[in-house]
Image: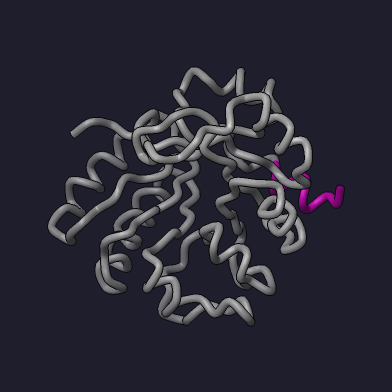
Amino acid sequence: MPDDLTADLATLPRQLLVTPDVTSRTQIATFASQLAQALARGIRLVQLRNRSLDADGYRALAESALALTHAAGAQLILNPPRDVADLWLDIASGKHAGTVPQADGWHLTSERLMASQTRPAGWRRVSAACHDAAQLAQAGRLELDFVTLSPVLATATHPEATPLGWPAFTALAAQATLPVFALGGMRADMLSNARHAGAYGIAAIRAFWPTA
């Protein structure tokens, strides 16, 4: 493995906080307070997931999150609503608009992952959501930095999804050529078990997000 890739992997935390949805700009102050608590507890990798805000709202959310994460020495990965991602990122070229907040990385949904022709340009880290072997293979072809593989266990976030279970997760993770974060039903005390099953780390919303 090249030295620069080894060094970058060494700075990749093993706990990934996926943020809960913010439905309006009026909730940003409360969100920021809770994010600050999560960072104070040691979270150093944050995926800013949102499915409700428009471009201006998500930009405001991202700017608030950026100030907090960078002050804490943490990394912020953008995962905006679908229509915002369509505005900000060109799938064919991998280039992003100049107005995109300058975070540490970009997260691809599984749909966008499979439609992408090249790795999004200009980001330190690019991750993707994966659920099967084909998506893991595509992430490898695009030379992404890490993926989430889900759902491992039953999760209230997606109650309709059939869990992989640990045996299937282990088999899929063994096929991956990049770090895999176990997502779905994770608790903070599951990191050791997840790593034993082939995960690099664990990702979660509720396990890492403080209550209001």
Check if residue 177 falls in the magenta segment: no
Residue depicted at x 60% and y 33%: 201
Name above or below for residue 134 compared with residue 56.
above
Residue depicted at x 39% and y 41%: 158
Check if residue 2 falls in the magenta segment: yes
Residue 2 appears in the rendering: yes
Between 45 and 163, which is closer to the camera in this rendering?
163
* Most common SS among magenta residues: helix
Name above or below for residue 197 compared with residue 80.
above
Residue depicted at x 42% and y 79%: 87
Outermost right residue: 1
Between 166 and 56, which is closer to the camera in this rendering?
166
Residue 59 placed where, x, y %?
32, 68
Name above or below for residue 138 compared with residue 190.
below
Residue 105 appears in the rendering: no
Left or right: where 159 falls relative to 25: right
Residue 124 placed where, x, y %?
61, 60
Quarter where residue 154 is shown: top left
**Magenta-highlighted residues:** 1-9
